[in-house]
């Protein structure tokens, strides 16, 4: 049995069954934006490998930091021990986040970071004397991960977890923010989506611990970009009803939208922030949940006075070293110019898709380019086209999108947009 036969028979693919798992490309090397396949073919990773490889693959600075750390100490438990990589990374995060948002809980994946955030919110509310606040609220069209509690806060109708049905706790949902990112903001709550939030919190706020959402960009739930002013109104409503506010910036953090964090568009500070994906530049799995000092103090002052969570690989030194090196690459303004260049080129080169008969919408924000089709794409055909075009894209449903690494050169980006236009043209 050769390697691919073994893979097909024994290794489970993401969001796939074992009978018909779908075709795969056999990657043997990755460097910069390029993936090299077992047969010698090369293709651009236009997805940043599910949005995490922001600096490209095998970045020398990150690899050097990880190699040095590997030779000293790959891992030690974080219970009762500490180490310089965790402390150094913590200093960097505190320096780049708003004042007060500075209590850091390390974990090993974005979905777990969301679970930790929800547990923080519930424990803080109980510690503050609100034991009935055990529910959560969110907007439709969102996605927060595949672990159990996180699934209950993904869209129950259009999301990918509907088959779990009543096994998931029923949460409170309001309509997705209706005003697009580049449209004029409407102050009327009936038209900007905030009246529904106000009604929800008025009716059920005493039982809601926190409101969670992806700021500005809804990722896997639909690749929608909404107006940042929604966050300002949401912050005010949460404060008025004693509901904590959680931002899931796992996909949007560290420059992807053109700002360091999507919340920076309006300088709204959440009570709890979830980070992951590009935190390590995609070189190793890692995440962080950052609580405001007031949340941390509430938990610490209550009973049992501790946050009841502790991953085995919490604050893994190797991951902390990778994350610090990745954040070093985001110092200064060079990355901002790079993302602005990518955004401008995506806007120009994807614009012709608007005239194609099969295209519903084209939208770009930062280093994110989306072509929304009127009908679902043939993912097997797109997968096969990667070998022809030299560009790896992985659409879902009607959405064809790219999140290229920041190191993508203009000529490489043109290859990506050309492939996207070719694919969009199939349905014309």
Image (cartoon, grey):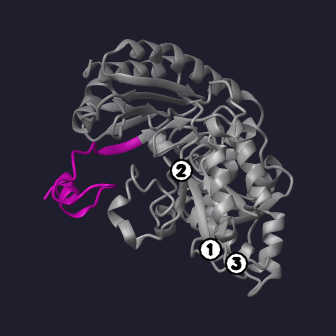
Q: According to the image, label 1 marks what residue?
A: 134
Q: Is residue 355 above or below residue 75?
A: above
Q: Main secondary structure of the magenta part?
A: loop
Q: According to the image, label 2 marks what residue?
A: 283
Q: Is residue 6 above or below residue 139?
A: below
Magenta region = 1-29
Residue 267 percent coordinates (x, y): 79, 41
- Foreground residue among 301 and 231: 231
Q: Where the N terminus falls, by quadrant?
A: bottom left
Q: Secondary structure at mark 2?
A: loop
Q: Quadrant of residue 163?
A: bottom left
Residue 325 percent coordinates (x, y): 68, 48
Q: Tell me if 206 is positioned left or right of 403 in this view.
A: right
- Foreground residue among 11 and 220: 220
Q: Quadrant of residue 80?
A: bottom right
Residue 334 percent coordinates (x, y): 72, 28
Q: According to the image, label 3 marks what residue?
A: 307
Category of crowding for the residue at label 1, using alpha-carbon neighbours closer than 10 angstroms: few (below 14), some (14–19), many (at least 20):
some
User: Number of labelled discs?
Assistant: 3
Task: Of the two numbered discs 3 and 2 on the same chain, state the one appearing first in sequence.
Answer: 2
Q: Is residue 79 above or below residue 135?
A: below
Q: Is residue 134 above or below residue 332?
A: below
Task: Of the two numbered discs 1 and 3 on the same chain, state the one appearing first in sequence.
Answer: 1
Mark-to-mark CA distance, 1 and 3: 16 Å
12 in magenta: yes
120 in magenta: no
């Amino acid at each position: 049995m050769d390697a691919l036969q073994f893979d097909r028979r024994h290794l489970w693919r993401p969001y796939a069954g074992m009978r018909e798992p779908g075709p795969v490309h056999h990657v043997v090397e990755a460097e910069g934006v390029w993936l090299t396949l077992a047969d010698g073919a090369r293709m651009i990773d236009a997805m940043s490998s599910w949005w995490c490889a922001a600096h490209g693959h095998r970045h020398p600075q990150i690899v050097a930091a990880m190699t040095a750390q590997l030779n000293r100490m790959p891992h030690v438990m974080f219970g009762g021990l500490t180490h310089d990589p965790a402390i150094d990374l913590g200093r960097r995060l505190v320096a780049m986040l708003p004042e007060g948002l500075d209590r850091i809980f390390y974990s090993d994946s974005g979905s777990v970071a969301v679970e930790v955030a929800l547990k923080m919110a519930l424990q803080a509310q109980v510690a503050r004397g609100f034991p009935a606040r055990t529910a959560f609220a969110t907007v439709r069209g969102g996605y927060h991960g595949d672990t159990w509690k996180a699934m209950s806060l993904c869209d129950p109708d259009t999301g990918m977890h509907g088959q779990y049905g009543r096994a998931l706790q029923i949460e409170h949902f309001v309509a997705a923010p209706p005003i697009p990112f580049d449209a004029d903001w409407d102050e009327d709550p009936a038209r900007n989506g905030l009246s529904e939030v106000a009604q929800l919190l008025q009716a059920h706020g005493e039982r809601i611990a926190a409101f969670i959402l992806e700021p500005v960009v809804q990722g896997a739930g639909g690749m929608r970009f909404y107006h940042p002013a929604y966050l300002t109104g949401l912050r005010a409503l949460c404060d008025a009803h004693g509901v904590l506010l959680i931002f899931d910036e796992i996909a949007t953090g560290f420059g992807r939208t053109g700002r360091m964090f999507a919340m920076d568009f309006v300088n709204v500070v959440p009570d709890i922030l979830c980070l992951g994906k590009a935190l390590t530049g995609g070189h190793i799995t890692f995440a962080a949940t950052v609580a405001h000092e007031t949340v941390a103090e509430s938990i610490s002052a209550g009973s049992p006075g501790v946050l009841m969570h502790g991953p085995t690989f919490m604050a893994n030194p190797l991951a902390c070293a990778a994350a610090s090196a990745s954040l070093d690459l985001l110092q200064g303004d060079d990355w901002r110019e790079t993302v602005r260049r990518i955004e401008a080129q995506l806007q120009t080169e994807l614009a012709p898709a608007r005239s194609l008969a099969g295209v519903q919408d084209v939208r770009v924000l930062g280093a994110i380019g989306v072509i929304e089709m009127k009908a679902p794409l043939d993912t097997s055909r797109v997968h096969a086209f990667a070998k022809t075009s030299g560009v790896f894209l992985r659409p879902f449903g009607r959405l064809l999108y790219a999140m290229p690494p920041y190191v993508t050169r203009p000529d490489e980006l043109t290859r990506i947009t050309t492939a996207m236009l070719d694919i969009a043209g199939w349905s014309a």
